[in-house]
Image (tube, rainbow, N blue to C red):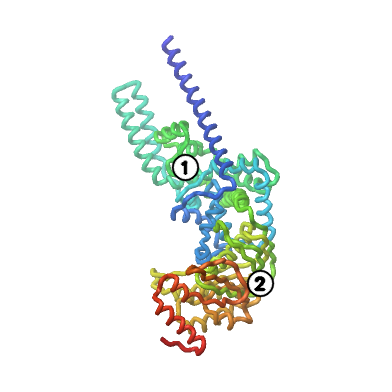
């Protein structure tokens, strides 16, 4: 009797010690996460991305982009918008970063929508306690790495339920062997080992097939937990979002009830619930043996099929909140920014004072005010392409996160297109010139759109000979001189600045040659470029003096006579 009491006492003490350790471990993790959230606020995100991760992040946008205008792949890649997204991505969940990416690729044409985003952003900048609470909730959801939760959620809705027979056979075999342990111990133990081995092998085989879908279910369940937490803290300023989140959450009440073992165990799929404490490990072994999470997963498929719309509403509203917090952190980090003034008019104009590129640490700021197209001239590396990208990126940021890197920014609501960083398409066996004229054609095709067009072209038709380039590019640029089109174009062809003087304003960048060195100030000046330093650069690099002298003579002769000679 005393031995039994002693054993029971030891078991109880061991259980209590385990509970205490779990509580301590969870509280320690919570403190560490809260400290990390405070530490990273307003700092440049340091995360590194693989190609697969970026691809996964973009999938939510891929599901949404069919709704209307969006920043196309050429424009996105020309402006290297992936780096802008990385600079902005102060999110903690796969939902937040996917929605932030989609937001950057789908400019808004509604001032009310942008003002609402700005209201949220300012609230989170000014209310540290509420913001940190929400960031903690989203951090508990986590990120899914190279797997897109949206792929598996939508695919999951199309799955058919799997037969449960194999799982119940495994469970029955284990209980039978346990019963035999007490009646025929030797045989029972051997059978128990065999039954558990079979059960585990079946489990890992089935889990491997279902793992990506289970990862998505885990993510959805964690989203529902965020919804519960948002309802508890009751922040009036986000009530319109929490109300929609609550309505969506209620439609998943059965989904949540039938998924404890699915979400409580440690996630070995690489999903948002990866890792965990001892209690998660314990639940894992229960799942390995009795397949409870797989059985629950099979019952959840039907629940999700009937509630995809609720999932989309949940995603949209949770994503809006976390995206706003990310932009709030970005504004805190950048310090120098402005809220753009956007007008919904048919005529084009753009005014930016001291505008700069967000990725340049010590930028040279420039100002521009135009109501017709701009031709940029200047030597290589003088700043033309960077300026085009600066204006284009800020135009996108104005209509997405309602934030511009400038002292003041004013413009229209635009559809934005670029034709800049093009390359030969070897896969389709297309030369640079073919790729270039196709890129320009897509811009021309949108000039009839109802919305005004803002376009940026770097070195028009650089892929062909001088005579045809000037002849064709002058006509293309002239056709872009419309009331509803604002075109910024960079060129080395000074002839275009004369041919198109009635249609475009001329601006230029310049440089100085000083003591065999070239100096750029990256400042924008009105008028066309007048200096020609390309031949002088050959001398600085160390080309033979005969080449330099004869090149200068040839250039001078052409200027005076219009004829080339060697």
Asked if residue 483 is positioned above or below residue 522 in the image, the reply reads below
Name the outermost residue toward the front. 515
Q: Quadrant of the N terminus?
A: top left
Is any atom of residue 307 visible in this view? no
Q: Quadrant of residue 456?
A: bottom right
Check disc 2 and report the residue beneath it.
370
Q: Quadrant of residue 365?
A: bottom right
Asked if residue 466 is positioned above or below residue 207 in the image, the reply reads below
Check disc 1 and report the residue beneath it.
297
Residue closer to the observer: 273 or 339: 339
Q: Position of residue 558 (x, y in %)?
A: 48, 86
Q: Residue at x 55, y 43 (%)?
A: 139
Q: Is residue 341 left or right of residue 98?
A: right
Q: Residue at x 70, y 44 (%)?
A: 236
The residue carrying pointer 2 sits among few (fewer than 14), some (14 to 19) or many (20 or more) residues within 10 Å by Cα, namely some
Q: Is residue 463 left or right of residue 390?
A: left
Q: Quadrant of residue 162?
A: top left
Residue closer to the observer: 233 or 541: 541
Asked if residue 333 is positioned above or below residue 39 in the image, the reply reads below
Q: Position of residue 508 (x, y in %)?
A: 58, 73
Asked if residue 38 is positioned above or below residue 441 in the image, the reply reads above
Q: Residue at x 38, y 72 (%)?
A: 429
Residue closer to the observer: 252 or 440: 440
Residue closer to the observer: 487 or 308: 487
Mark 1 against mark 2, which lies toward the viewer? 2
Q: Position of residue 427 (x, y in %)?
A: 39, 68
Is any atom of residue 143 visible in this view? yes
Question: Residue 407: which disc?
Answer: none
Tell me the element at label 1: helix
Lower sequence index among marks 1 and 2? 1
Q: CA distance from mark 1 to mark 2?
A: 59 Å
Name the outermost residue toward the top. 2
């Amino acid at each position: 009797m005393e031995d039994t009491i002693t054993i029971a006492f030891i078991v109880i003490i061991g259980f209590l010690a385990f509970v205490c350790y779990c509580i301590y471990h969870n509280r320690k993790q919570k403190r560490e996460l809260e400290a990390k959230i405070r530490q990273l606020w307003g700092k440049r995100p340091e995360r590194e991305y693989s190609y697969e991760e970026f691809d996964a992040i973009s999938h939510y946008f891929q599901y949404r982009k069919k709704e209307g205008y969006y920043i196309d792949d050429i424009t996105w890649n020309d402006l290297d918008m992936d780096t802008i997204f990385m600079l902005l991505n102060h999110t903690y969940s796969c939902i937040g970063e996917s929605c932030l990416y989609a937001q950057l690729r789908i400019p808004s044409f509604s001032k009310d929508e942008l003002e609402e985003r700005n209201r949220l952003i300012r609230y989170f900048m000014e209310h540290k306690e509420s913001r940190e609470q929400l960031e903690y909730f989203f951090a508990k959801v986590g990120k899914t790495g190279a797997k897109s939760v949206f792929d598996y959620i939508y695919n999951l809705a199309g799955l058919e339920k799997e037969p449960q027979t194999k799982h119940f056979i495994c469970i029955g075999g284990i209980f039978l062997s346990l019963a035999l342990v007490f009646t025929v111990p030797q045989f029972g133990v051997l059978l128990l080992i065999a039954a558990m081995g079979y059960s585990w092998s079946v489990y890992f085989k089935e889990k491997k097939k279902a793992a990506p879908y289970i990862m998505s279910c885990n993510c959805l369940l964690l989203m529902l937990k965020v919804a519960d937490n948002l309802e508890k803290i009751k922040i009036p300023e986000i009530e319109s979002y929490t109300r929609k989140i609550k309505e969506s959450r209620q439609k998943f009440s059965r989904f949540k009830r039938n998924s404890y073992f699915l979400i409580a165990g440690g996630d070995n799929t690489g999903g948002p619930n990866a890792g965990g404490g001892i209690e998660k490990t314990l639940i894992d072994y229960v799942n390995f043996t009795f397949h409870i999470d797989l059985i629950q997963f099979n019952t959840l498929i039907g629940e999700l099929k009937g509630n995809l719309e609720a999932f989309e509403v949940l995603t949209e509203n949770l994503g809006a909140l976390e995206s706003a917090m990310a932009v709030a952190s970005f504004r805190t980090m950048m310090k120098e920014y402005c809220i753009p003034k956007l007008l919904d008019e048919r005529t084009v104009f753009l005014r930016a004072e001291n505008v700069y590129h967000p990725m340049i640490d010590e930028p040279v700021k420039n100002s521009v005010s135009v109501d017709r197209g701009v031709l940029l001239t200047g030597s290589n590396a003088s700043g033309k392409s960077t300026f085009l990208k600066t204006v284009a990126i800020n135009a996108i940021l104005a209509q997405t996160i309602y934030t511009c890197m400038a002292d003041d920014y004013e413009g229209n609501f635009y559809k934005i297109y670029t034709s800049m960083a093009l390359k030969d398409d070897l896969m389709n066996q297309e030369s640079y010139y073919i790729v270039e004229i196709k890129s320009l054609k897509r811009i021309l095709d949108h000039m009839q759109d109802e919305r005004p067009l803002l376009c940026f072209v770097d070195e028009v038709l650089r892929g062909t000979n001088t005579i045809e380039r000037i002849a064709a590019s002058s006509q293309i640029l002239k056709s872009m001189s419309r009331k509803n089109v604002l075109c910024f174009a960079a060129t080395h062809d000074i002839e275009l600045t004369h041919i198109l003087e009635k249609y475009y304003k001329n601006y230029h960048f310049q440089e100085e040659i000083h003591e065999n060195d070239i100096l750029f100030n990256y400042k924008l000046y009105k008028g066309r470029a007048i200096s020609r330093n390309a031949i002088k650069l050959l001398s600085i690099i160390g080309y033979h003096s005969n080449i330099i002298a004869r090149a200068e003579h040839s250039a001078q002769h052409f200027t005076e006579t219009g004829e080339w000679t060697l």
